[in-house]
Amino acid sequence: MATNKKSKIVIVSEHPRRVPVSKKNPSGQTIVDRHLRHIEGQYLDLVLIDQTFKNHEKKNIIQPAKAKLFFPNEDKYDDYISVWVDYFNKKLNLKFPLDPDMLKALIASESTFNPDATNKKATGLTQITTDTLKIIQDLTGESKDFVFKDIRKKDLKDPNVSIAMGTRWLAYKKQYAERLLKREATADEVIQVYKGILNDKSDMAKRIMTNYRGFYGKLKKK
């Protein structure tokens, strides 16, 4: 009498690919990660960024404060801010949600609401650096649970792209700060982590945070 054997299911995360024989690959094979199968629905490219913003339910989401900072165009990007904060608060199921005013104050301090703001290291409204751009698209990197795909440096001048990526990076830095501190991180602490100056006692770090705190305080003032 034949017996039924239970089959073992193995989830394969890598597969071989044939390549030209060389000193580096004498066998003519290399191993390739099956990237997108692992993150289906957990990444955004340019098309999905546009579609997600347009299709996101905008009723009853929290808007940042308006007309408080006296910058040209300071309220021009509020819809992007409110949508992406709401999106990532829900998508990442953040225990302590992001505050739209925190993101708006960050943009004020990083670029004064100039989408073309550029320096040697950073670009756009949220001043995404070249290093962050790589990390936030790396399936093995710090933000691997939700990444972006095929975003180039020049794309960061698009306010929708810059704010989407800046919000994602801010959410990661908030989670990182809370793991580091073993408690809920204050807005101040999250921004210090975002700017890479947590526990930095230098005069430059003090100026950076004084600038940010001024904007955030104005947005919160009734």
Image: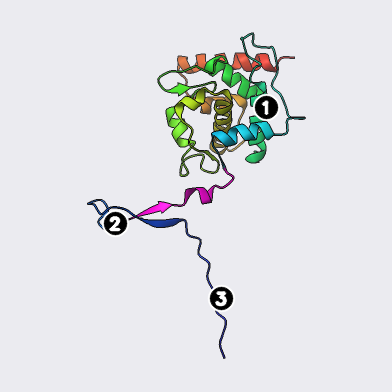
Highlighted magenta segment, given as a residue range: 28-42
Q: Report the Cα–Cα distance between label 2 and label 1.
A: 51 Å
In contact (CB < 8 Å): disc 3 and disc 1: no
> Helix, strand, or loop for circle 2?
loop
Label 2: few (<14), some or many (≥20) within 10 Å? some
Which residue is located at x 57 percent, y 35 percent? 47
Residue beneath disc 1: 82
Q: Report the Cα–Cα distance between label 3 and label 2.
A: 35 Å
Q: Is residue 199 above or below residue 30?
A: above
Callout 3 amino acid: Lys
Which image quarter holds the C terminus? top right
Residue beneath disc 3: 6
Q: Position of residue 66 (x, y in %)?
A: 70, 15
Q: Which mark is residue 28?
A: 2
The stretch drawn in magenta includes residue 171: no
Q: Is residue 104 above or below residue 48?
A: above
Label 1: few (<14), some or many (≥20) within 10 Å? many
Callout 2 amino acid: Gly
Q: Nearer the viewer, residue 168 or 77?
A: 77
Foreground: disc 3 or disc 2: 2
In contact (CB < 8 Å): disc 2 and disc 1: no
